[in-house]
Image (tube, rainbow, N blue to C red):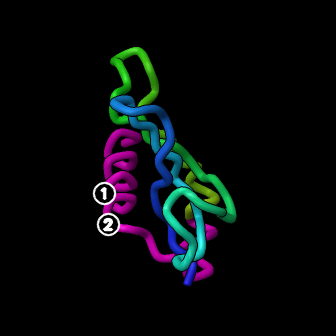
Amino acid sequence: MVVIRLSRGGSKGRPFFNIVVADKRVRRDGRFLERIGFYNPTAKETEEGLRIVQDRLSYWVGVGAQTSPTVDRLIKQAAKKAA
């Protein structure tokens, strides 16, 4: 199964997450099919904290990819921010 989830980056105490499309069997920070955005929980007010490429997200969901609960929450947050 293909899943859309977060992949952690950054350093200790300064997390940074990529939103990736990956096979469910692959480890969290391992190989992925495509990077479709990022999430920076420690972003300052002048920095961009969340970006999701909506057309690629709709493509992957259209072909059957499942979103993780956290990514689902971030998608809703991005939609509210865009509106």
Which residue sits furthest top?
46
Which residue is depicted at the point 35% across and 19% down? 44
How far is the residue under mark 2 from the one under mark 1? 6 Å
Residue 52, percent across and down?
Answer: 52, 47
Q: 16 or 34: nearer the eye?
A: 16
Which residue sits furthest right?
33
Q: In this view, does 22 lie to the left or right of 17?
A: right
Which residue is depicted at the point 33% across and 30% down? 13
Is 51 located above or below residue 25 in the figure? above
Residue occupied by mark 2: 69
Is 45 located above or below residue 33 in the figure? above
Which residue is depicted at the point 36% across and 42% down? 83
Is 60 located above or below residue 6 in the figure? below
SS class, disc 2: helix
Residue 72 is covered by the magenta coloring? yes
Q: 1 or 29: nearer the eye?
A: 29
Residue occupied by mark 1: 73
Q: Write down the quadrant of residue 20 in the picture.
A: bottom right
Which residue is depicted at the point 32% across and 46% down? 80
Residue 74, percent across and down?
Answer: 36, 52
SS class, disc 1: helix
Q: Write down the quadrant of residue 15 in the picture.
A: top left
Q: 57 or 17: nearer the eye?
A: 17
Residue 33, percent across and down?
Answer: 69, 65
Is 2 located above or below residue 13 in the figure? below
Question: What amino acid type should be assigned to the residue bearing mark 1?
Answer: Arg
Residues in magenta, as a range: 58-83
**Quadrant of the frame with the N terminus:** bottom right
Are the residues flagged by discs 2 and 1 in contact, CB closer than 8 Å?
yes
Question: What amino acid type should be assigned to the residue bearing mark 2?
Answer: Pro
